[in-house]
Image (cartoon, grey):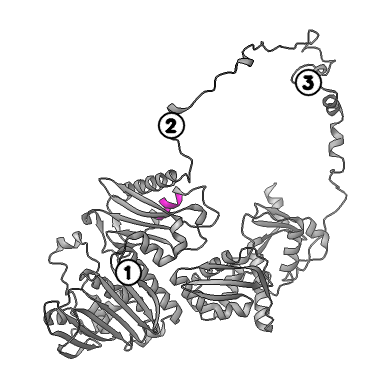
Amino acid sequence: MADIIQLLPDSVSNQIAAGEVIQRPASVVKELVENAIDAGAGQIKVNIKDAGRTLIQIIDNGCGMSDTDARMAFERHATSKIRSADDIFAIRTLGFRGEALASVAAIAEVELRTKEHDHDIGTFIHISGSKIITQEPVRCDSGTNFQIKNLFYNVPARRKFLKSNPAELKHIINEIQRIALSNPEVAISLHHNGSVIYELTGTNKRIRIVSLFGKNINQNLIPLDTETSVVKISGFIGQPRYARKTFGEQFFFVNKRYMKHPFFHKSIMQSYEKILPPDSFPSYFIYFDLDPADIDVNIHPTKTEIKFENESAIWQILQASVREALGKFNIVPSIDFDQAGSVEIPMPLREFSNVSMPGIRINPDYNPFDSTKNHSGSGNSSFLKPSERSNQTNWQSLYKGLEPNFETQPETWDDESVQFKIEEQQTIKNSVQFKNKYILTPVKSGLMVIDQKRAHERILYERLMQVLENNEVASQQQLFPETFELNASDATLLTSILPDLRALGFDIRDFGKNSFIINGTPGVLNTSSPIEIIESLLEEYKNSPANLQEKARETVAISLAQASAIPYGQTLKTGEISELIDNLFACQTPNFSPKGKKILSIMPLEDFEKLLK
């Protein structure tokens, strides 16, 4: 049998590595900007065209590279940051895998211009699909200038599965945010198709947060500063009253590296327990500084998941630090023992110095063994006022008119039809709300259970789709237009779906610098908090499946219905329950929510009878 195992060509192995390291344009931005920071850059410029499909340009003023280093940088496992296996567990730099540039060069056209500060001539390298086209001397500025063109041009399957430009741009913005927050001393600018998204100067952490998320967040920030033998924790947390219903302002960093850590997030949420509005998330920007030997950053290709040796201890320290910060700002009740000695007890005034002993009233005729007399639990009724004695004998009159009418028989439901049409209004009157989440309604064959939020989502969704289909835009103008500010990522997303929101009846205008003004809302919605609706809409839209986002208007309608629907925990009046049921069974598809989840279910009468056997 002939040998069948062969070594892959470098171009193929680089493309395989690119599948792990380079997932989308944002991955290229992350790797190259991190390399620029490791090179000591104090200023980094990022230019993007077509969300990275056409061009990704990274310009820095770092140390630059020699002609030999510039060529070696594109080889796999070539790195300046690791010399032995022990170095892997003592890493304080960002990029270190030695595969990033080789992976990028395998799936794009790359042009590199680089020069060291003490040299007059730099190096130009042009690589396409791992093949070196040109390497020659060139006059250029000190530092490094990367141009990545036509990403995934030779891997059409990968290019095909890229999302829309707004979606890919959002990922790039997120990566820039993470790097900018962890390196506030570095000036970073981001331009897309010639428009400025960020122009950040070197500063401190607080000003960097405000620069990224708007000036309104400044009053929200509470500082953290805890130092122990295990870890140093610094940064900021948000006040509970400014908590938002969307994610996007929650960041963990360890040794200047962004990370995701659900376990530590749980610690934060427990610290805010019982002081947060329902379904909301506090902002936090938390920086961990500890010995690199106590963490492992190489457990995931993107290096966003990090293993801690003392995870449980850090969890406790983090929670104590957050609670201490909340207590200092009087967010949670705290006891100040330093003030215990200053408590003053008032002395009695002179006019009250002659205090008489309280009298005790007794009934000498009281006999607890005499069953012929009616005694109250507190003594003889002769001590009661006339009105109190009257209440003892006439208490039944308090409940007149409230007796249940057992003669009224509940009407039945015709549940043979798929849409469960309501036969009689009296049936609706017998509906009750359970746990402020479900509506229980008797039907012919048993008990119908309706999910109130999903039911309202279906109602709103069909109304919104009707507006789109019939082009019946009805906007309810705000008496007082509201202005709000978003971070760059959410602002980009909102801008991309503004035409669809206008088609649904929203009157939202771009106010500049990631600010927007709401002049009107859809007439089919009944909301007093349009800003909360927009924030919830963006969160729902971001969490929509990728294939659904291709149908932008339908996705916006679904997200808007979910964001505007009656939340769980809201008490409904009888009239509201009746209206909800009426509107639900007037829908074309009352059985399922816009995302395909069941709205209602019937528990047969036989199941009840089995429970009581």
Within the image, what quadrant is residue 262 found in?
Answer: bottom left
Front residue of 358 and 496:
358
Q: Residue at x 22, y 84 (%)?
A: 112
The CA distance from mark 2 to mark 3 is 48 Å
Within the image, what quadrant is residue 63 found in?
Answer: bottom left
Disc 1: which residue: 201
Within the image, what quadrant is residue 391 found in?
Answer: top right
Element assignment for label 2: helix
Within 10 Å of the Cα at label 3, are there few (<14), some (14-19), or many (20+) other Cα atoms?
few
Q: Residue at x 16, y 85 (%)?
A: 123
Mark before the other along the chain sequence, 2 or 3: 2
Left or right of 203 in this view: 414? right
The kind of residue tagged 2 is Gln
Farthest residue in the top direction? Answer: 364
In this view, 35 is above or below 397: below
Task: Give the numbered dot on residue 376.
Answer: 3
The kind of residue tagged 3 is Ser
The kind of residue tagged 1 is Thr
Left or right of 224 in this view: 610? right
Q: Which residue range is magenta in the image?
A: 265-270
The CA distance from mark 3 to mark 1 is 80 Å
Is residue 206 a member of the stretch shown in magenta?
no
Left or right of 359 in this view: 254? left
Element assignment for label 3: loop
In this view, 487 is above or below 107: above
The CA distance from mark 2 to mark 1 is 44 Å
Residue 336 appears in view: yes
Q: Could you tell me residue 447's position as x and y percent?
A: 72, 57
Q: Nearer the viewer, mark 3 or mark 1?
A: 1
